[in-house]
Each structure stands twice: as C-alpha cells, then as structure tokens.
Amino acid sequence: METLDLLLDRSVVFSFDRSGYERHARRFTPLPRLDGQTALVTGANSGLGFWSARGLARLGARVVLLCRDERRGEQARAELAAEGQVEVQRLDVSSLADVRRFAATWSGPIDVLVNNAGVLPDTLQRTAEGHELTFATNVLGPHLLTTLLLPSLGAGSRVIAVSSGGMYPVRLSLRALQGQVASFDGVAAYAQTKRAEVLLTELLAAKHPNLTFSAMHPGWADTPSVRSSLPRFWALMKSRLRTPEQGADTIVWLAATGALASGKFWFDRREAPTHVVPGTRARPGDVEKLWALVEGAIAGR
C-alpha cells in the first residue's frame, strides 16, 4: 500500500486531487481543542479562509475574520455563528496603510495567524502605493501584518502561510515579483509569490525561534478564486477537485496539532518538499535579496 501511495503521489494529479486527499486522510487523527485561543484568518469570507475559520471555531478557538469587504465578512460570520465565537474586522492586505491601521488597533494575544488572503489577477495592476497587486496582496501585506503583530504573538504562537503547489515549476525571480516583465502572466506572477511565501517562512522561522512558522499547500481545491481566476483548469478538473474543507484541513491541523518543526512546508498533514522540479532552487544570494526587497518595500524604500 505504501508503494502504491508513493507512486500515486508522484503522479501529482492523483495526489493534489480529491482522491489524493481521501487516500491521505486514512492516516489522520482527531485534533486537540483550541479553547481559549485566538486565531486571525485573512481572506476569511470564502474559500480556504472560510473553511479554515470554520475548522478553528469548531475546535473552540475565538476566530477573527479579517476581510477586505466587511459586508461579505458579516455574511460569513453569520454562517459561522453556530460554530463558536466568530468576529469580523476589516482588513485589505493589499494596502500597507490598511495593514498598519489594523495592527495599530489590535490588542490582546494571538495564538494563530493564518495568512490566507490572495489574488490572481489576469492583468498587471498596481496598488495605490505602487506595488504589483499580486506581490502586494500575497507577500508584502502578509509580511507586514506578521511583523507588526509580533508583540501579540507569544511563545509557541503559530503563523501559517497558505502557499500553492503552483510554485513548484518556478525559480524565484525578484524582477517578476515586482511586475518588471515584458508580458504579464497572472499565473506566473501568482506562482512567484507562492514561492516567495515559502522562502520567507523559512527566514522568519530562523529569525524568531520562539514562534512556529509554517507554509502549506492545499492541493487542488474547488474555491471561488479557482473558478474565477483559472476557469479552464476548473472546467477540466472540476470533477476531481477537493472540497474547500479538504483543502483547508492542513491549515487547521497546523494550528492545532502538537509541537512542529518551524520553517517547514506541509501538504496533507505531512512535511512536503519545497522543490520537485530541477532548476528551481534560488540563485545564490537571491533569498537574501528577497528579504531586503520585502523589508524595503514595506519601509517605503
């Protein structure tokens, strides 16, 4: 059985799809309670964020939905009201100014921070602060949010970055991250940000050993963003896609399970490789340049 599982996992299709989740879930065990803990989830009004919030609330955590659209956030809160203590606060992670506003208003300890919000635009767009939208939403905003909330993250708190298996074919490109390309490709830009998230998770883990930083990928899940941003992929694979709840499972597990090694990449409750395609490891010095780029961008340099 283990040999068959290994062969199916190497196929990608039969690992990232619903059958892969169902096969992997045979080894899953019940999760401990999170009573008395506070969890923040960005992009929590739909998709993986919504189902992560539901899973955390069901385990007893106080869950704060951080949503760009407060009306949609309230709709999600109403749907989750029966699950436990759920609140809504407005936050647009693509805006560094709004991240600073939110962080300045936050008080109290945070046990879990899920950086889930993300975008995949099909055209090159820049924020009011001049950053390429995918980079701003998926990388800069979450990094600034994490940095500003460090005083509220006590020893043992967990920070989870929701990445994507779509990062596997790409090598980090600092120019592409910033939208400095001859022709913009939304899928390629998204993959670059997801690669960057994993590298930043490793760097943050080294810089803050008292916290647990994790990155994960959800496999291929049927979420509203997949339907709208990848319509051809969705039409081709819709019968094989995971449910959003299945895609969010590892997020909830990372928040609730016992002690974890920090700085790792996870898939279906197991550590996963960060590189499976030859030639995708960062060039010498590029990881350090990524840190400098992100820190400089959030500092306005």
Image (cartoon, rainbow, N blue to C red):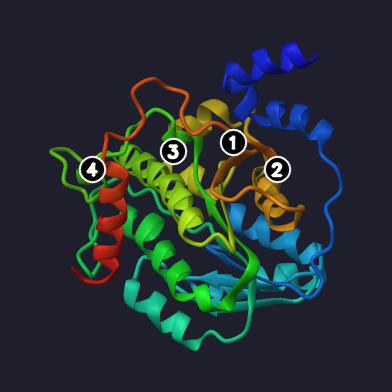
In the figure, is residue 45 to the left or right of 177? right
Mark with earlier residue (1, 4):
4
Q: Secondary structure at mark 1?
A: loop
Task: Name the residue type under label 2.
Answer: Gln
Looking at the image, which is closer to me, 105 or 301? 301
In three-dimensional space, the C-alpha distance between marks 2 and 1, rounded to whole angstroms, equals 9 Å
The residue carrying mark 1 is: 219
Task: Name the residue type under label 1.
Answer: Gly
The picture places residue 83, in percent across and down from the top left corner, at: 80, 68
Residue 137 in sight in this render: yes
Question: Would you say the residues marked 1 and 4 are in contact, meaning their CB atoms lie under 8 Å apart?
Answer: no
Tell me the number on the disc at residue 176.
4
Of badges 2 and 4, nearer the viewer stands 4
Looking at the image, which is closer to me, 56 or 32? 32
Residue drawn at 49 percent across, 48 percent down: 225
Tell me the number on the disc at residue 263.
none
Of badges 3 and 4, nearer the viewer stands 4
Question: Would you say the residues marked 2 and 1 are in contact, meaning their CB atoms lie under 8 Å apart?
Answer: yes
The residue carrying mark 3 is: 230
Mark with earlier residue (3, 1):
1
Residue 133 in sight in this render: no
Within 10 Å of disc 2 (Cα), the crowding (few <14, some 14-19, many 20+) is many
Q: Secondary structure at mark 4?
A: helix
The residue carrying mark 2 is: 246
The picture places residue 300, in percent across and down from the top left corner, at: 21, 71
Of badges 3 and 1, nearer the viewer stands 1
